[in-house]
Image (cartoon, rainbow, N blue to C red):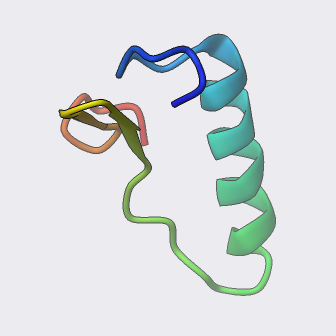
Amino acid sequence: HPSGVAEPSRADELLTSDLKNALALIDIRVLDHFIVADTTVMSFAERGLI
């Protein structure tokens, strides 16, 4: 992640939401979005953000 911290920015949340909505139009389901920073990984699904 460009910030170096495995926490989602507002831009990450908006981009994920936009991609999820766009892909739903063609029947593709987004299961998760991972943010990786150094040795830390954050999952949108685990946090209930997706």
Asked if 46 appears above or below 47 in the picture, the reply is below
Asked if 11 appears above or below 21 in the picture, the reply is above
**Is residue 18 found left or right of 16 in the rendered image?**
right
Front in this rendered view, residue 49 or 36: 36
Q: Residue at x 80, y 63 (%)?
A: 22
Q: Residue at x 40, y 32 (%)?
A: 49
- The location of residue 18, given as percent across then percent down, is 77, 46
Quarter of the view holding residue 31: bottom left
Q: Residue at x 39, y 16 (%)?
A: 7
Asked if 29 appears above or below 36 in the picture, the reply is below
Front in this rendered view, residue 25 or 8: 8
**Is residue 3 found left or right of 18 in the rendered image?**
left
Q: Residue at x 72, y 72 (%)?
A: 23
**Is residue 47 found left or right of 26 in the rendered image?**
left
Quarter of the view holding residue 9: top right
**Is residue 33 found left or right of 44 in the rendered image?**
right
Front in this rendered view, residue 41 or 45: 41
Quarter of the view holding residue 4: top left
- The location of residue 39, given as percent across then percent down, is 19, 33
Looking at the rendering, in which quadrant would you find the C terminus?
Answer: top left
